[in-house]
Image: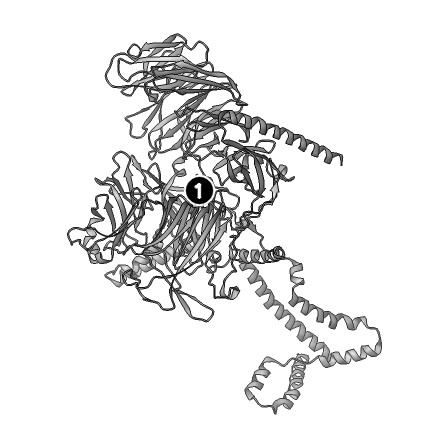
Amino acid sequence: MQIMSKRIFSLIFLFMLSSFNVNADTSLEEESDSSRYVIEGRVFPLSDYQTSQVNWQANTKIHVNGGEYIGFVRKDGSFVVHNIPAGSYVVEVLNPEYTFEPARVEINSKGKYRARKVNHIKTSEVIVVPYPLRMKALGRTRYFQIREQWRITDLLFNPMIMMMVLPLFLIMVLPKMMNDPDTKKEMEQIQSMAKFELPEMSDMVSNFLAGSSQTEKSDKSQVPNKKNQKIRKRIDK
Amino acid sequence: MASFRSICIIPLFITLILNLTWALYEDQVGKFDWKRSFVGKVKYANFESKRLIVATEENVLASLNLKDGHILWRQLLEDPKEQQINALHVDKEIITVSGAANNWFVRNWDINSGTLLSEWTLYTERLVPSKFIITKNTLVHVVPLTGSHLEVTTYNLQTGENYGKTIRIAAPWITDISNCILTTNYYVCISSNDNLGQLYYVDVISESNIVHTRPVQSLIGDGSGPIEIIEIEGDISALLLVRSKVAILVLLDGENIDAKPFNLMPNAICVLNEDRTLIFQLEATDDPKKLIRVKSKDFVNGDDELSIDLDYPLGLGAPIILAGQCRGSSCDLLLTTTDNALLLLKLPEGKILWTREEALSNIVATEFFELPVSELDASIENEFKTSSSSILNMLIHRLSTQVKQLTNLVIGGQLLSNNGLVRDKFGLHKIIVVATKVGKLFAIDTLTGSIAWSYRLPNVKSFNSLNTKKMLLFVQRTARYAPLPAQCLLLAEDSNTGRGVLFQFDPITGFSSNGIERLNYKIAQALLLPYEDEDNSKPVIVLSTSNEVFLYPSTSRTLVYQHINNVFIYVVDSVRGLLRGFSFHHSTERSLKVSPTWEVRINPSKLVALSAKHPNERVHSQGRVLPDRSVYYKYVNPNLIAIATLSEDSVHKHVLSIYLVDGVTGLILYSTSHKRAKGPVHLIHSENWLVYSYFSERFRRTEIVGAELYEGHLQSNSTVFSSHAVSLLPHVQTQSYILPANPLNMAVTLTERGITNKFLLISLSNGGVIEIPWLLLQPRFNDVPCGPEESCIPYMPEVPLPNEAVINYNQTLGRISGIEVAPARLESTSHVLVHGLDIFYTRVAPSKTFDVLKEDFDHLMIVLVLSGLILASYVTKHLASKKALKQVWK
């Protein structure tokens, strides 16, 4: 809390300083050229600026009306754009890594300032922002798409996998959880019923070629026969 | 409520748009794009321990690494067309004075990081070229008024506070400002350029302000020829008096004036070396291998100390010494050349440490070239071409090429390729030929960004067309015709006479058989014909300002005459506000003649932009399918010219008018106007549509308009378009949008067959180049429902500019002056070169790379999974049979 209050105090102090500067500058300007004004403000860095960009001030520029007038950011983050005649201007802060919200500054012929949010659609709408400008970074600019990474969770929460896993869980785990002998027996019965032999490929093809329903019976008798034969062979070996 | 709805809708469309745009992945950075940064032609330079501080004609302040010439930091000041850096002073901090006429910015920079420390402005009422002296704490502004007096004002360097009043020094002897110089604190003039002239000098800093005079003849001696006064680099109160390229050093010290008794070259500089001042100068030598000799002389008596012949690279122009620094016996000299290159010379070794080709900061023409096939591929092709006499020969040839192929496969390199400049499978490897403003040609490899060759054309300048500098590059023959080399033609202007300059060269090697050809007429227009002569080269028609027709190569006259009824040419006269069309109907087989056919007068409006379609553009789909499955045919006229004019109006301030003119008949097909609109106006014209942007003064925002032309439900001619045959005007659909940024340039992507969607590439004032799908700007049909089925996005007034669409991501580009686009052989991809103060190359794929596997396609994974599955099925089969056996035994 103490730190907070300290920071606020220092901010206020800075603003007082900057407002003092305005007066000094305008008086200077009036001496030389009455129709030229300055736009000033301050760029507030994000807290992770210090870690990522060593001298962000040098990489940050102020563009007024898309580069018609330009300003540079000083070490403390403040900026002044000189030699501006009365009019309406869009002030942008440009930094390759961070995005800032632009502001519209209007200077009337008497030298009064008004700053407001830029709204290209409702151009007459006025949302006043404080002047001298306080430009805060909206966030890190994301230029890149994030590449999709293969994650195990993605796979598991895939609906198809879920559909497969759940019945499997029901079939495999639930019977083992049941201890009741009767139900166990029943389950075994069901299991034994469920256990049907997969017909062999060759049989299927031959059946298909035969194409008649009468082979059903012989089919049923054949399959175990074949199996038995095979088994016998193996035993003989 | 409305705002709530919009909140809901916005994310939906952002996701939609994100799918439309093709953003990069972070790991693709630098994979196929590269950036080269430049600073421009160096005007002032200063050594500072391990760094070089340079101020350039591009109004750029930069710090360069002394070891390799890389840019440590760079600050772009105001627009160089209006403002220039006028003084640079490096001490503990850097001080620059930049500006124009009477308005100056005095800026104070940190030397390590380039951060601004302080800034103030200086304003005077005098609109004459003035000079500045920067000392430790003061800035002295000297305004000379010809024939009258000098005005000297002193300011505090840090705060801009004015010290006292302006001092006026009577100086009726200032006759011409070009005869005056400023050296440390003396203002020196010569009254006339002949032997009778007097040398006047005054110390402007001291308060006495006594003007001293001395006859020039007593200093330089007798002789004929005009005398010039020039400054000498180095912190001494001295100047050079030059007569017929021989210079005499004159030292000023209060009342005393001392002319040194030795001769110097006019490009000499003084360098302080441990209390002793040395003079360095460059001389030409007779040795053809070592063209330049560096000499250093003692400052006091002019004795030669050092004389070294340099291994000066041949392609560079004549050098001038900009600055120097000495430490003991070793010295560094910074040289700049007539072709804007910057070199660092190390003495006493006489070695050139690095070279920066600053000419590339001003590109005026660009062309992409396909590379020739490798020798191996060429030999295979030759097999079918050469009708060899015997079967045995053919067999030997076949066997030898196959052996070569095999060895190539085994060793796995491009062993047989010459220097790696060989065509690849997808046409992604190309060579970019650029012409620069100083008249130097460069060929740049698209894969690496390195310079393949360069060629300097002396005394050449660019054409001035609509406030942009331009040269013309024509591809007469591509590298496809194997034994014949590719051929390219450059047209420019002679800087002395203003007449045409023609240079024909091979774009792959830079070799020119004819050299530079100076023409004896001024060029008004040039045209590359689409017909090939027997040498497979396309003829170029050049029209002179006096409407004479010239043909290059002149041997293809009969070919041109066969097609003469299909050739038309137009000329834009932006000064008189005139567009004129010509035909060649009256030419005979002997001589080609133009006859005017149409004229469009745009006076008193000012022509601000003009755009014709790219000659290589192809339109794939002929129409748009409507929901009722009928086809609405596009109006695809390859002869259309789009022009934009601005006119002053008493009520609406400025009025912007857009016209679509048929280049053959002069028929104005469409015109529209916007009130209270001002420039900059950008135009793009492609397929059947037109996009233009302007600044709306009424709403103070940039607006962008898309217009589409349709023939209707019936197509007039499905095979060949003819401008003469059109009977109905096209239907025009338009829609306008807000562009929440400041566009600098616009371009549109170009692909081989035109199947891929089109993207607009717009360079913005913030240094980014953004891609916008044409679909976003395409006018919506009122009676057609808009939805994903019709591949239509509902209308949004503001064009969204997501950060993912910035093709140069965080690599901000300085002062973008143009975007060049060329198709790759891969249909999905086009090459993009963005130039300005930086050069940035990348590839864009508007419809994503649908014709190649993604680069993250994992072949290994697929093989592993498949083999794993096969293995698993065998294992399970075995296990199953085992289990079955067990069951039977039970």
Instruction: Give residue B329's position: percent from left, percent from top.
Output: 44, 19
Total marks in image? 1
- Which residue is rendered at x = 44% and y = 59% of the image? B756
When the figure is inspected, residue B755 is found, relative to residue B813, above or below; the finding is below
Instruction: Give residue B379's position: percent from left, percent from top.
Output: 32, 55
Q: Is residue A117 visible from the viewing direction of this image?
A: yes
Of the residues shown, which amino acid type is indicated by label 1? Ile
Chain under callout 1: B
| Crowd class of label 1 (few under 14; some 14 to 19; many from 20; radius 10 Å) | many
Farthest-out residue, top = B255
- What colour scheme does the image use? one colour
Farthest-out residue, front = B651
Query: In the depicted view, which residue is nearer to us: B628 or A77?
Result: B628
Instruction: Give residue B234's position: percent from left, percent from top.
Output: 42, 19
When the figure is inspected, residue B595 is found, relative to residue A80, above or below; the finding is below
Q: Secondary structure at mark 1?
A: loop
- Which residue is rendered at x = 50% and y = 35% of the image? A86
Position of the C terminus of chain B by quadrant: bottom right
Residue A222 is left or right of residue A176, and the answer is left
Quarter of the image for residue B257 reads top left
Farthest-out residue, bottom = A214
Q: In this figure, which residue is indicated by the disc labeled 1?
A: B816
When the figure is inspected, residue A223 is found, relative to residue B120, above or below; the finding is below
